[in-house]
């Protein structure tokens, strides 16, 4: 079996699909390798806790599974903890991905970071260790689907 049971579960029953209308930050990133797109919405409370996370992905099964897991992992976390949700951590939580699909998990990490960056920009704060998103492609709502 190419994919773990957890990957298949999150692919077939993705958690947190959708939008957050009054999101504190959003991040839209594209994967240069395959052209897939992901948008993440974060709701962050005044004390800096991620209260809710949702995503929309126009992408492959591994991208859907990693976004699903990444949004599950970030909920309830502080900003600092959220920053430590790397693609490696998400892949570990999914019991791994085939090597050819590792780049898909990077999309989820980049989308989370882009949403945190947007949040920081809106709040006028600096999040230590957070870099500006590289693959931010801005608003592409018209091509978003899942
Ligand atoms: Fe594009 Fe997986 S093939 S994100």
Image (cartoon, grey):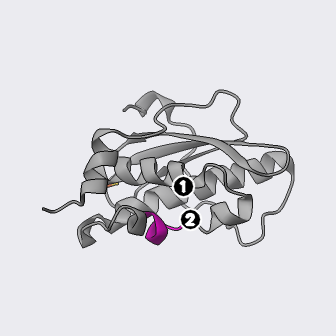
Picture residue at 55% right of the left edge, 31% below the top: 19
Judged left or right of residue 90, residue 128 is: right
SS at badge 2: loop
Picture coordinates of residue 76, whole percent (x, y)? 66, 50
Callout 2 touching callout 1 (CB < 8 Å): yes
Residue assigned mark 2: 85
The quarter of the picture where residue 99 lies is: bottom left
Tell me the quarter of the image containing the N terminus: bottom left
For ligand 1, the image quadrant comes to: bottom left
Mark 2 residue CB less than 8 A from any atom of ligand 1: no
Q: Is residue 61 left or right of residue 115?
A: left
Pointer 1: residues within 10 angstroms few (<14), some, or many (20+)?
some
Judge whether residue 135 can be spotted in this image.
Answer: no
Of residues 27 and 32, which is closer to you in this image?
27
The answer to which quarter of the image holds residue 11 is top left
Q: From the viewer's perspective, is the residue at label 2 or at label 1 nearer?
A: 1
Q: What residue is at 51 percent from the left and 49 percent from the top?
A: 72
Please tell me whether mark 1 sits on a helix, a strand or a loop: helix
Q: What is the distance, in whole Å, between disc 2 and disc 1 at their CAs? A: 8 Å
142 shown above or below 71: above
Q: x and y percent of residue 46 in the render?
A: 85, 44
Q: Is residue 37 left or right of residue 82?
A: left
- Count the numbered circles shown: 2
Location of residue 42 in the rendering, given as x and y in whole percent from the top left corner: 64, 43
Q: Which residues are magenta?
A: 86-90
Who is closer to the viewer here, 14 or 58? 14
Q: Earlier in the sequence, mark 2 or mark 1?
A: 1
The residue positioned 43% from the left and 47% from the top of the image is 68
Q: Give the residue pinned by disc 1.
A: 73
Picture quarter with the C terminus: top left
Predominant secondary structure, magenta span: helix
The circle on residue 143 is none
């Amino acid at each position: 079996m190419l994919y773990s049971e957890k990957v298949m579960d999150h692919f077939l029953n993705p958690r947190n699909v959708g939008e957050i209308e009054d999101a504190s930050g959003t991040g839209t990133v594209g994967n240069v390798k395959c052209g897939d797109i992901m948008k993440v919405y974060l709701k962050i409370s005044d004390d800096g806790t991620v209260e809710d996370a949702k995503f929309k992905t126009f992408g492959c099964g591994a991208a859907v599974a990693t976004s699903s897991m990444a949004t599950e992992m970030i909920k309830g976390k502080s900003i600092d903890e959220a920053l430590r949700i790397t693609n490696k951590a998400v892949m570990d939580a999914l019991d791994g991905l085939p090597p050819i699909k590792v780049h898909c998990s990077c999309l989820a990490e980049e989308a989370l970071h882009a949403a945190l960056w947007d949040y920081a920009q809106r709040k006028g704060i600096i999040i230590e260790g957070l870099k500006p998103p590289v693959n931010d492609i801005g608003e592409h709502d018209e091509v978003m689907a899942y």
